[in-house]
Amino acid sequence: MNDLRAKVGPDRLVDEYGAAVYRFCRGLTFSKEDAEDLFQDTFLKVLERPQRLGEDPKKTLFSMALSLWRSRKRKIARRERIAPTEPLLDQIVPGGDDPEASLLAREEERRVREAVAALPEKYRVLLVLYYSVEMKVKDIAVTLSLPEGTVKRRLHTARGLVEKGLAEDD
């Protein structure tokens, strides 16, 4: 294990996989702050137990991030059942030269985010990995321990559900 730790140091892991893991975390959480927390916790977990990296560090990092995110969701759901809170408004500062175009783009982004967030987890995670992290179907299948055909079918279904959700809003 010391050979693995020397070969795959934390700096190298962050340099090599950090951007992809952050995009994945951002796609899961839809929040910059939550994504940063999840990203840090994922790499902290690796530092605490480098032996968990296994043969494919990228797969392990995504699996750890997904596991941590699921745990947080359960914890938040428990807290919400005990003491409900009101959601905070998303505060996006308009940018660009054309305020109307900026507003329309933000509104479209919000609608897509809501449609993706409304999907069951098995579809949402695939969309995040495919579009945000830009993983290939084969890599997603390995990461999630699913057959490639299942990944393709779920991606197709997820796209259809997002389209349906967006059409219902119109």
Image (cartoon, rainbow, N blue to C red):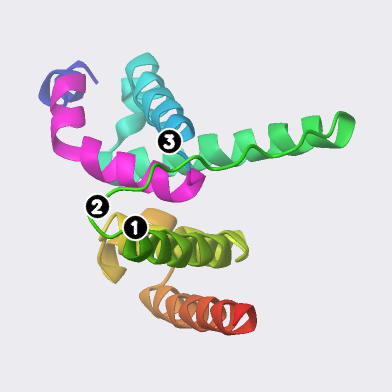
Is residue 54 located in the magenta-colored stretch of the structure? Answer: no
> Which residue corresponds to mark 3?
35
Contact between marks 3 and 2 (CB within 8 A): the answer is no
Hey, what amino acid is under mark 2? Gly
> Which residue corresponds to mark 2?
96
Q: Is residue 134 left or right of residue 155?
A: left
Q: Nearer the viewer, mark 3 or mark 2?
A: 2
Hey, what amino acid is under mark 3? Ala
- Which mark, by number, is residue 109? none
Query: What x and y, as percent, mark residue 34?
Result: 48, 32
Q: Earlier in the sequence, mark 3 or mark 1?
A: 3
SS at badge 2: loop
The residue that appears at 14% across and 31% down in the rendered structure is 15
Question: As rendered, which of 43 and 166 lies closer to the eye?
Answer: 166
Contact between marks 1 and 2 (CB within 8 A): the answer is yes
Within-10-Å neighbours for mark 1: few <14, some 14–19, many 20+: few
The residue that appears at 44% across and 26% down in the rendered structure is 37
Give the spatial CA distance, label 1 vs label 2.
7 Å
Within-10-Å neighbours for mark 2: few <14, some 14–19, many 20+: few
Q: Quadrant of the N terminus?
A: top left
Query: What x and y, as percent, mark residue 4?
Result: 18, 25
SS at badge 1: helix
Q: Which residues are magenta?
A: 9-30
